[in-house]
Amino acid sequence: MRLLPLIAATYFMVSGGPYGLEDIIGKAGYSRALLLLLVIPFFWSLPTSLMVGELASTLPQEGGYYCWVRRALGPFWGFQEAWLSLTASVFDMAIYPVLFVTYLTRLQPTWTAGHRGTLWALAVVVLCAAWNLRGARAVGEGSIAFFCLLLSPFIILTVVAFAKSLGSPHHALANLTAPITAPDLAGAISVTLWNYMGWDNASTVAQEVEAPQRSYPRAMLIAAGLVALTYILPLTAVGLAGIPAAQFSTGAWTDAAHSLVGPWLGLAVVLGGTINGFGMFNALMMSYTRIPYALAEEGLLPRAVALKTSAGVPWVSVLLCSAAWALALNLSFERLISIDLVLYGAALLLEFVALVVLRLREPALHRPFRIPGGLPIAIASGLGPALLIAFALWAARDEHIAGIPALLFSAIVAATGPLIYLLAVTLRRTAKRAA
C-alpha cells in the first residue's frame, strides 16, 4: 500500500465516518458531545497515534504491535499482547456487521426480519474475507472508494444544515446547548473512546506498506485530523439546524438527512451506513489476520496458519478469524463496546510500556520518527490513555454478559492468555523434539 490507501485504511480501522456518533448525542446532548469529541482526542487519539508513528516506523514488521511488545518485554508479554488483541477483535469485529444490518433495516425492514438479519451479517463476513484474499493493496484502494462514497451524503447534509441554521441563529444555538432529560455521560464517554480507538491496527501490515518509515507517521496524523473533522462538522451542523438530541440513537442520521434535505439524501445516508459497516470490517480484517500469521511464524500456532496466497495474504488466518468473528454476531452493541474497551485497553497499555522500555533499553535504535520531548514526554504520553481506560473499566461495572459482569468476563478472557501461552510453548517444544 502507498500513503493514500494507508490513510484511508487507517481511517476505517478507527472511524468509518459519523456513523456511531448517534449514541453520544443521545446520551450527552450536543454541547457535551462536541466537548467530548474535541477534548478526548488530545488525551486518547493524539498520544496513541504518536506512539504508533514511532514504533511502526522504527519496527515495521508484519504483526505490528505484537512484534513491538515481544521485542521490548519478551515472548510471554508479546503473546499476551496478541491474545488480548485477538480476543478483543472477536467483540470489536461483531459490531460492524451489526451496524450494516441496522442501516439495511432502515432501507427495508422486511429484508432483515427474523433470521435474515443474521444472514446479512454473515454475508458481510464472507464478502470481506473474499476481498481480503485479494491482498492489502486491494483493501487499501477499496478503502479510498468507500471513504468518498461514505462521506458524500454528509458533505451535503453539513452544508445544507449550516445554511438553514443561518436563518435563525438564536434558535440554532439554543438547540445546540439544550440539555437532555436523561443524560448518561459515562456511556457517552465510553462510546466516544470506542469511536476514537484503533490507531495501532494499521501497524500489523507494515511489510505490505511502501516506505513504512515515512508512511506511518504521516498516515497516523493525517487520519487523526480526518476522523476528528468528519465527526465534529456534521454533528455541529445538525445541532444548529434544530434536530433534537433526544431523537438520536443508532441509525438516526437517516432521519436527520430526510427531514433537512429530503428522502433521497436519507436513502444515501442509509447506503453510506452499510458502506460504513462493510468498510470498517474489511479494513480491520486485514489488520487482525496478520497477528495469527506472526504467531505461527514464531511457532506459537500451527505452521499451517502462516500459509500465504500468491498475493501475500495469510489465507488460513483469514478463514479462522472470520469463523471466530461470526460467532459473536448476536451480542448487543453496548455489551460489545464494554468488553472491547477493556481488552483493547489492556493491549494498548502494553504498547505504551513497550515504547518506554525500548527507549530505555535501546536508545541507539534508529527511529525515523520519535515522539518529541525526550523520555519524559514518551512516558507522559501513556497517562491520558491509561486514565481513560480506567474510566472505561468503572463505566462498565454494571454491564453483564452470559449472566456475569462484563469486567469479570473480560478478566477471565485475559487470564486465559498465560495458560494458552504455556500450552503453545509446550506444543512447540514437543514438535521440535519430534523433528
Image (tube, rainbow, N blue to C red):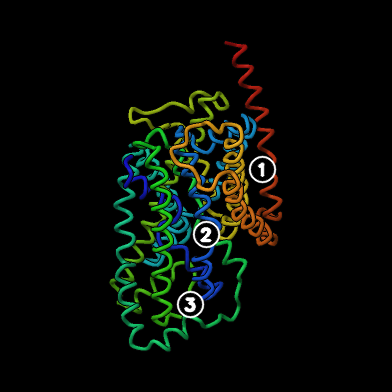
Q: Say above or below: 86 vs 24.
A: above
Question: At x 39% / y 86%, what residue is drawn?
Answer: 169
Label 2's element? helix
The amino acid on which the numbered mark 2 sits, given as a three-letter code, is: Phe
Q: Position of residue 50 (x, y in %)?
A: 49, 48
Find the distance from the CA under tag 3 to the CA under tag 2. Answer: 29 Å
Q: Which residue is mark 3?
A: 247
Quarter of the image that includes the C terminus = top right
- How far apart, in angstroms, are the residues tagged by discs 1 and 2? 28 Å
Residue corresponding to mark 2: 42
The local secondary structure at tag 3 comes to: helix
> Compared to 169, does 235 lie above or below?
above
* Local secondary structure at mark 1: helix
Badge 1 or badge 3: first in the primary sequence = 3
* Residue 326 visible to an observer of this rendering: no
- The Cα–Cα distance between marks 1 and 3, rounded to whole angstroms, is 37 Å
Count of all numbered marks drawn on residues in the image:
3
Residue 246 position, x and y percent, is 51, 78
- The residue carrying pointer 1 sits among few (fewer than 14), some (14 to 19) or many (20 or more) residues within 10 Å by Cα, namely many
> Tag 3: residue type?
Gln
Q: Which residue is mark 1?
A: 414
